[in-house]
Amino acid sequence: MADDSHERGFRNARGRQRPDVRRSGNRSRSASRPAERRREGDPARRAAYDVMRAVERGAYANLELPRILRNAGLTGRDAAFATELTYGAIRMHGLYDPVIELAAGRPVGQIDPPVLATARLGVHQLLGMRVPPHAAASETVALARSVNGAGAAGFVNAVLRRASERSREEWVAEVTAGRERADALAVEYSHPVWVVRALRSALLGHGASDAEAVDADLVGLLAADNDPPRVSLVARPGLADVGELLEAGAEASELSPVGAVLPGGDPASIAAVRQTRAAVQDEGSQLLALALAAAHVDDVGDEGEQWLDLCAGPGGKSALLAVLAQQQGAVLFANEVSEHRTELVRSTLRAAIDAGAEVMIGTGDGRDLGQEEPDTYDRVLVDAPCTGLGALRRRPEARWRRSASDVSDLAALQRELLTSAIDATRPGGVIGYATCSPHLAETTTVVADVLGGRSDVVQEDARPLFRDARGAQVDGLGDGPSVQLWPHLHGTDAMFFALIRKTAP
Ligand SMILES: C[S@@+](CC[C@H](N)C(=O)[O-])C[C@H]1O[C@@H](n2cnc3c(N)ncnc32)[C@H](O)[C@@H]1O
């Protein structure tokens, strides 16, 4: 039976039996005879291979995988197996490549990329998924035969045989031996070494760790980056409430007063999500929008407040801000530079607009808004384009696509956007500067540099604005005045937030 291997592996990895959904799914595969199936290879592994190759050509796994699963007719546990295999092999190849090099006796740069993709899939089954070794090897060799050719299948067979001779722990010890600490962590936890160093500096710089604890904290953070995030939902106030999400099977969030966590299943099966009254949204993003809306603003006129989201696409925070603005009698301008992403904002905000939230949506360069509309807005969010180093757990390929030079390129844009946001804010109003990266060069350094060059702003302590579901201040926010959330401490993306007040000129 072609997929006995992944059924067992998947069940073992989860520690419980999953319902048998195969009877209803993937009729074409069940209809093929065993000999034919073996020649074709297992469809779930083939799907994983196709996604890996597409990602190497620049595709995003989270967009490519559903399309390939659909085309292959894979559902239920076959789809879950293919997902775990694909994401793990892409995410963890920083560890698997040195294993493959030792097992193959040659550098991965000398292995044909399609063959390397197959070998990575095989090694992930052996070291990351607890698929029985004989099944991992035989099914992956069958895959290699069908996609890489007979010669390559022999090579993959030899590599996997050697890889299966040791446990993951033994391989980690072997491939990290003699490396300096950051390099060893980079291999064991499969991150680029520059990211490991940046995250270590960020833990220290944001006051989330100290010299004694930082090595252990860094391990916790790197490990959290390798755990797929739980599915967090937001109930957009006034459009849905948390109770509605709980009734649909979600569990209450401890962190966000408007949040819930979906333990399993498809969020799109929830009516409120389909209708954009609720949505999938990281709890950190929820807290951040709530914090900006809760900040004190001086001397609001009779017309009510004007809010600006300077970098709004695809609209997750704008949608929350829109309903909060409505509750506070304010209007929101959601600005985005890309036309395509402006359209996404429009659809994300549909339910809020239908419910009467006063929102304008526009396409434009946020760097110009400060000059075009000086001293205008009461609350401004700059959710700046950034490296996304705080959200590595979401996209398996993201860590491999960034380079250290991206940080300096983005830092210039981040400074210009923050400067423009301050110019667009009226005296007495507030600016929230946010990133989904904890990198110091994108966070505290940007804020310090921009504020250092002006006399009309002060930074305020943002920590009291971060309240959990019980109304208490969220723990572990750092030394202040800015806030830094962490995957290993809060279960959120590593979002940064600084609150800046514009004073009289
Ligand atoms: C981190 S994302 C914002 C995420 C959004 N706030 C949300 O919660 O859905 C940054 C956005 O900034 C946009 N952007 C980049 N450069 C910009 C610019 N010069 N002016 C305005 N927006 C810009 C990007 O297109 C991207 O959509």
Image: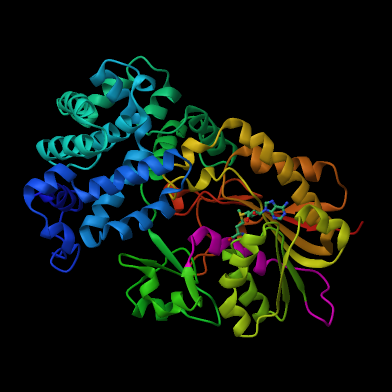
Q: Is 430 in front, or is 20?
A: 20
Residue 424 image position (x, y, % from top left):
83, 60
Q: What is the count of numbered marks?
A: 0
Q: Is 105 in front, or is 243?
A: 105
Q: Say which residue appears at 86% left-offset and 63% top-offset.
A: 373
Residue 432 image position (x, y, % from top left):
69, 57
Q: Residue furthest right?
A: 505
Using residue 118 as the reference point, say whether residue 293 is left or right of it: right
Using residue 240 as the reference point, say whether residue 376 is left or right of it: right
- The part of the image, by quadrant, that contains residue 260 is bottom left
Magenta region, residue range: 280-304
Using residue 86 as the reference point, say whether residue 278 is left or right of it: right
Task: Confirm whether the magenta stretch covers residue 464.
Answer: no
Quadrant location, the C terminus: bottom right
Task: Confirm whether the magenta stretch covers residue 288.
Answer: yes
Residue 414 image position (x, y, % from top left):
71, 46
- The part of the image, by quadrant, that contains residue 439 is top right
Q: Say which residue appears at 36% left-offset and 19% top-offset.
A: 110
- The part of the image, by quadrant, that contains residue 88 is top left
Q: Is 452 in front, or is 318?
A: 318
Q: Residue furthest bottom?
A: 355
Residue 221 showing in the rendered view: no
Q: Say which residue appears at 59% left-offset and 65% top-offset.
A: 344
